[in-house]
Amino acid sequence: MATLDDLEAALRTSWDPGTVAVYADHLQLLGDTRGELIAIDLRIEDSGPTPELVRRRQEILASWLGAELPHGVIRHGFIDVDATSADPVSQARVAFEGPGALFIRSVAMVGPPSLVAATLAVVAAAPRPSLTHVTIRQWPESTWPPGRRGRAAPGVEVPHGLAEAAPHLTTLELEGREVLPGFGHKNVRRLRVSGWEAIAFDGLPALTELDLAFHFHLDDSPLPPKDGELETLLSPEVLPALTQLDLSRNEPGQFDPHNLGGRKGAFHFLRTLGLRSQLTKLRLPALNTNAELMDLQFVLATMPALRELEIVRVKPQLEHLHRQIEHPTATIRIG
């Protein structure tokens, strides 16, 4: 028979209603009111809310979490924290210093480096066994001079306890410049990053999925990587497990959601990317020029493991060249 730890480990890996229902039954046998709360959520999802279910759900939440509920979503006995107001630190404290802290599975935060650092310090202050997903959107300090490299204003320290506090962290979403410098984690498998300097890629040996935008929307002075710098950061030695790469947000420019490539072309970048031979899935931005088509043809010939290729769209003038985009083992989708 599966133990409580077994069920929680299974839910961290794959969230499915069957496992959730077994988990709820197990909690109820132990006298944990979270079990009833989960059962109510499952009934509401299956049959819709009734006044009795809503009332009982509110009673259980109040008895478990107190009068001040964490900001975000509370469902199936777990909490997804939304700390994206003007005061993310206070929102993080309500959640991570409250009675439901052990069951927080995700947190999103925003702000300049000083606020992000303070919010991360709250998150990393104690063990977070359920935390699997962290989202950080960071913008420059208002006092920074234009074009400044570097993460924080003088005196702002980056907390380094996140990896230790959240051993089961699997997904990171980062936006900004040097959001988590020097950060490493042996279990992170999925990374969505806007801003090539947001994180040190060499601390993520288990990373399999990378969605990379070279720049980020609020960067008022995008600093492109030097020749070869980004290619070195994304090498087979640095990311040995990477098999899925999404570059679709890198059309020229610096505006969300697709134009975050700055002046660096995604198709030409692929020509110099050493790990392309290990990729099985590749997603690319719009194909707009004959030069990009030539780059793509060259790259595809050097990707023996590729199984899926998706291109956001092809410029109308190049549509007649669709037949030149081919690969012996990959399914190709365009548009």
Image (cartoon, rainbow, N blue to C red):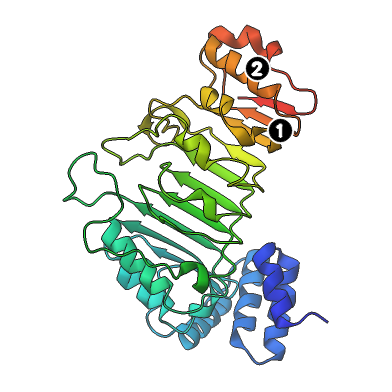
Q: Residue at x 58, y 47 (%)?
A: 238
CA separation in Å, label 1 and label 2: 15 Å
Q: Secondary structure at mark 2?
A: helix
> Within the image, what quadrant is residue 334 found in?
top right
Numbered mark located on residue 308 in the image: 1
Q: Amino acid at mark 2?
A: Gln
141 to 292, vertically: above or below:
below
In this rendering, is residue 312 above or below 159?
above
Closer to us: 38 or 157: 157
Q: 44 and 245: which one is in front?
A: 245
Q: Nearer the viewer, mark 1 or mark 2?
A: 2
In percent of width and height, residue 287 lies at: 54, 19
Relative to 84, is 176 above or below? above
Q: Nearer the viewer, residue 326 or 295?
A: 295
The kind of residue tagged 1 is Glu
Disc on the earlier residue, 1 or 2: 2
* Numbered badge on residue 297: 2
Query: x and y percent of residue 280 in the render?
Result: 71, 37
Q: Is residue 221 left or right of residue 325?
A: left
Give neighbour class at mark 1: few <14, some 14-19, many 20+ (Cα, 10 Å): some
The answer to whether residue 199 is above or below residue 124 is above
In the visual, does 110 lie left or right of 289?
left
| Residue 286 visible in the picture | yes
Residue visible at 61% across and 20% down? 296
Q: Disc 1, disc 2: CB below 8 Å?
A: no
